[in-house]
Image (spheres, helix red, strand yellow):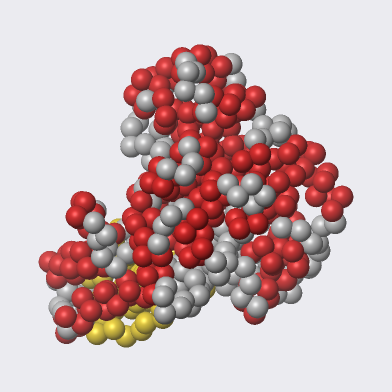
Amino acid sequence: MGILKKYHVASGSFEVGHTQPRLLQAFLGTCVGVAVFDANAGVGGLIHLLLPEPVSPWSVDQPEKYATTCTPLFLKQLFDQGATRENMQAVIAGGALVGPLTSQDMNLDIGGRTAEKALAALTAEGITVVQSETGGFFTCCIELNMQRWQCRIRPAGFDKVDRDAGESSPVFPDVQQAIESIRPIPQVALKVLRIIKDESYRIDKLAEEVKKDQVISARTIQLCNSAMFTKRRDVVSLDHALVFLGQELFIKLVISAAVQSYYSQSGNGYSLCKGGLYHHAVGTAMIAEKIAGMTDKAIPGIAYTAGLLHDIGKVVLDQYIAGVYPMLYREFQDRQSEIIDVETRVLGMDHARVGELLAKKWSLPVSLTDAIRFHHWPEESRNNDPLTTIVYLADLLMSRFHPGLELERMGTDHLAGQLARLDLAPGQLCDLVDLIPGSVFEPAMETTEPPIHG
C-alpha cells in the first residue's frame, strides 16, 4: 500500500479519477461537498460546491461554483470514465447555516439549499446517497480515499487535539511584552496607506519608495508570481510589475508584502495549515474590497487593507494558543462558542482587543483601528463606520466558505442588521458570496492538511 497523496479540492471545483493512492479533501463550512464513487469500476471524485444556483446571467461563466450547473458536469465525467449508476454511491457533507434563522431569513440558509440542489441532481440520476451530514453551524472535512474507495466526514481543526496536554494562559503583561517585541510596520506601508486617499499621488514615486526597502521589494515580486494574486509568471522587477499589473494591484501587493512578515511569525496555534493566518487575511481583504466596490460604502483600497489587518491580534496571541488547546477544544466542541468568547474565557483577552493595541502602537488611521477592534461586532464601532461592517461580512464569508485555514467562529445574531447598514437585504447574501474571487480559494501556500496538535 502506497502513501496517500493528499489533494485539496477548492471551492467551486471538482476532481475525478481512477483508483490511485490519493486522498481527496474538502474543508466545508457553508459550502457543500459531494463524493461519488463506483468501487467496481474504480472511478470516483469529489465536488466542492459554493452556491445552490447561478445568481445572475453572468454567473454561468463559472458553472463549477453552483450545484445546479456543476453536479451534471461532475457526474458526466464519472460516467465517461466508466462509472455506472447502479454501482455508484454518494456522500454529502457541509452546508452549515450562516446564522440563526427566522421565517424572514431563509435566504441565509445557503448551504441547506445547495445540499438540496445537489441531492436533487443525484436522485434524478438514480444515484444512491449512502451518507449525508449537512447543516449545523460549524466546519467539517470530507475525504475520499481513491485507493480503497472509502469516504469519511470528520470535524475540522480539533479532531486530533490531545485533551491531556498541559494548560497555561498568558497574563496581560506577557501580551504587552509580546506587542512591544513586534517590530514597527514598515514605513513604505504607512506611505501607501496615506496615498490611497490622495488621488494626486504619482505611482512612479511610490515605486521608488518601495525599491528602498529590499525586503518588501523581494516579497512584492514574489507575490506578483503567486497564483493567489495573479496567474502571471516571470515578473522580475518592481518596474515590470507596475507595467504588467497596473497601479491598483501593485499597491495591494506592496501592502500585502509588508504585512506578510507579521503573519509568517505565527506557528501552529491559530493556523490549521501552514500559512493559514496569512491566507485567510488576504482572502478577507479581497472580499472586503469587492464588497466596498459593490456597495460604494468605503474606498476599496482601504477596505482591502482593513481586511488584511483585521486578525493581526492573532499574531500576538498565537504563541500562547498551543498551550491551551485542551481548554479551547472544550470551549469550541462542548459549548460551541464563537472565537471571541473562547479567547476571553481561556486567555483572558481576545485578538480584536490585542489588535487594537497593536494598531495604536503603529499609529494606524482611526478607521483601520476601529475595523480591527470591532470586526466581530461592528454595531459597537465608535464611529459607526461602514468599513467595520464590510470587514465583518468579508471575514464571515471567508470563514464560512473557505474554512480549514485558521481557528474562527463568528456570531451571526445580527447579520440581517449588518447587511442593512450597507443597504443590503438578506436575499443579497448570495450576491456577496458570488463576488468572492476564485483566486481566494487557491490552496494555502504550503499545505492544506491541518496539523496534529498535542
Pick the front one: 24 or 281: 281
Percent x, y for residue 172? 84, 53
Pick the front one: 90 or 40: 90
In this rendering, is residue 430 above or below 38?
above
What residue is drawn where x is 48% and y is 37%? 299
Q: Quadrant of the N terminus?
A: bottom left
Look at the image and tell me whether residue 403 can be seen.
no
Pick the front one: 413 or 309: 413
Quarter where residue 164 is shown:
bottom right
- 59 vs 278, left or right, is left
Percent x, y for residue 89? 26, 81
Look at the image and tell me whether residue 120 can be seen.
yes
Quarter where residue 245 is shown:
top left
What residue is drawn where x is 72% and y is 42%? 358
In this rendering, is residue 251 above or below 377?
above
What residue is drawn where x is 69% and y is 40%? 359
What residue is drawn where x is 49% and y is 71%? 99
Pick the front one: 256 or 318: 256
In this rendering, is residue 430 above or below 136?
above
How many numbered dots are placed on residues in this image? Answer: 0
Percent x, y for residue 439? 37, 46
Q: Quadrant of the C terminus?
A: bottom right
Percent x, y for residue 323? 75, 62
